[in-house]
Image (tube, helix red, strand yellow):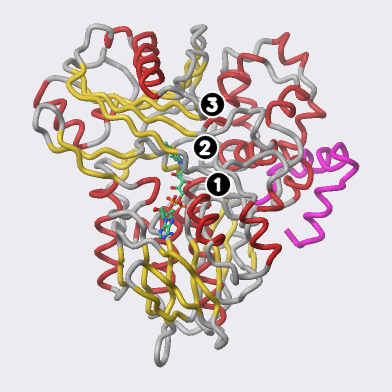
Amino acid sequence: MSRTPSTPGPPGGRDRYARTLTPRPGAARVPGDPPAVAVAGGGIAGLAAATGLAERGVAVTLYERETVLGGRLAGWPVTLADGTHATMSRGFHAFFRQYYNLRELLRRADPALEMLTGLPDYPLRHRSGLHDGFRRVPRTPPWSALGFAVLSPTFGARELLRMSPAAALPLFDVRVPGVYQRLDDVSAHDFLASVRFPQAASHLAFEVFSRSFFAAPHTLSAAEMALMFHIYFLGSSEGLLFDVPNEPFPMALWDPLAHRLAASGVRLRTATPVERVDPLPDGGFAVADGSGTRRFDAVVLALDTSGLRTLVARSPHLADASWRAGIARLRTAPAFLVSRLWLDRPMAPGRPGFLGTSGYGTLDNVSVLNHWEGEASRWAARTGGSVVELHAYARPEDALREVEQKRLLDQLHQVYPETRHAAVVDARHAWHADCPLFAVGGYADRPTVRTPHPGLVVAGDLVRTELPVALMERAATSGFLASNALLERWGLQGQTLWTVPDRGRSAALRAVARWAGGRGRSASAADSQGY
Ligand SMILES: Cc1cc2nc3c(=O)[nH]c(=O)nc-3n(C[C@H](O)[C@H](O)[C@H](O)COP(=O)(O)OP(=O)(O)OC[C@H]3O[C@@H](n4cnc5c(N)ncnc54)[C@H](O)[C@@H]3O)c2cc1C
């Protein structure tokens, strides 16, 4: 896949420096008997891979362990105490405008993205009373960073003078994989300390972002944090603006996409975990599920961290020993809690649809679902109540669930005091630990899309794509990259992909950053790879 300057730019994007990744030329459809591919995992990554392959006529069978598609964005039915049928999920997800490849995947079933609705701001609030937001901040770097510093109450003149600009320079020249060579062995916490970033801003901005990776700043790789800052702030003109689905995930996203996949011939096998994958002498693979074994020409592993670790441990002949050892060392981030509460009264007027929080204890954010999600808003309109969702990330292993759930409710009472006297009509709590941990020094162990076996590819938000993408966008991009790698083998055309710019935007700042960062050590390593 080659990189070209951005002509044309990403669909719907406003960033003229966004990158276009043009796939190798090839046939639009399989000419004869189609190759057969097993995609293991029905989250965003698996759905993107299945889409990319099926659109070229490849015979795809998608295996998903759970009864529903969507992975971490799956939804499941619940019946509330008042008899209402509702949908529970891991809840609030921000669909940023620079998620070009995810949005292209969703456009397959909804060309105008009518199921997404924009929220007006990304407000942040610290318990001390400090507020921040990004609505008024200019969207084009470097004005975004300067605007944030000028408009934010967390940057006083004294704090700005204390900062170490030289230590902050790597943030202005983020390239992949150079940023990992430079910063993967440092924790996000230590990096911020070296920058002497104002403490209030650090708590409000960086900690909220770092915890969005489900890790406390002292366990998160500084490279991953710097990359995130590049994608969402310093490197992209799309800004920190995001959309949310206007109905629960299954109705808005996965049912329509599944319908489309089935219509293009994909066999969707939910409630069917893949138990083992073995390479065959003819170059294909034997894929075993509970009911038997089938032969495939190629396999996409689009699993979460523990799913991938388990499957590879059960498949001792896959790829090679060093690849398998790297997979065995992958780590899962600590558990998180999502509490959804159906309350008997409305929230005070003006409460935002989403609020990032810091300093309250365990609470990371609060969403008022009935402000933007159809199902919740219909319930609120009918009952006069409200539907609120609370997230707490990176909870310790020995956390007592009942205690944590109660603590979260107490923190809601502090953030939105009108909820103190509300009766809880129903409460659902989702505890999971299925996000990858981007641990300090862990980059080298993460699998790339391609493996030592040309017919075996990996996708998911844990994968090293060597591109500036993260979270849901990394899942979608790696899924398409996995399908492109297979399509290329068969002389078929892959998908065009886009990313935010893959280097710092300002040539002057890049030059200074390169000079300061070990006299060009890591940046020139990236340069030498042609990025
Ligand atoms: C609470 C929460 C909030 C988040 N908020 C955001 C956000 O605001 N913005 C953002 O960009 N990202 C966010 N994320 C991250 C986002 O959810 C993930 O990056 C994304 O969903 C990962 O998709 P995936 O396809 O890589 O993995 P997954 O969604 O985990 O899919 C892997 C699938 O593999 C299946 N599987 C496992 N083992 C097997 C097997 N043996 N056989 C068959 N199937 C198997 C699993 O059941 C699962 O469906 C959030 C995550 C959580 C939990």
Disc 3 element: helix
Whether the residue carrying mark 1 lies under 8 Å from ligand 1 is answered with: yes
User: On the image, numbered disc 1 is attached to which residue?
Assistant: 470
Name the mark on residue 239: 2
The magenta segment: 502-531
Give the foreground label among 3 and 2.
Answer: 3
Disc 1 element: loop
Q: Residue at x 52, y 56 (%)?
A: 308
Direction from residue 82 to residue 17 in the image, left or right: right
Q: Which badge, 3 or 2, comes first in the chain's sequence? A: 3
Direction from residue 152 to residue 241 in the image, left or right: left
Disc 2 element: loop
Residue 62 in which image quadrant: bottom left
Name the mark on residue 480: none
Whether 525 is among the magenta residues is yes
Could you tell me residue 302's position as x and y percent? Answer: 48, 60
Q: Residues within 10 Å of mark 3 (few under 14, many from 20)?
A: many
Whether 316 is among the magenta residues is no
The quadrant of the image that shows the C terminus is: bottom right
Q: Nearer the viewer, residue 458 or 111?
A: 458
Direction from residue 414 to residue 143 in the image, left or right: right
Which amino acid does the dot numbered 1 rest on? Answer: Ala
Direction from residue 530 to residue 63 in the image, left or right: left
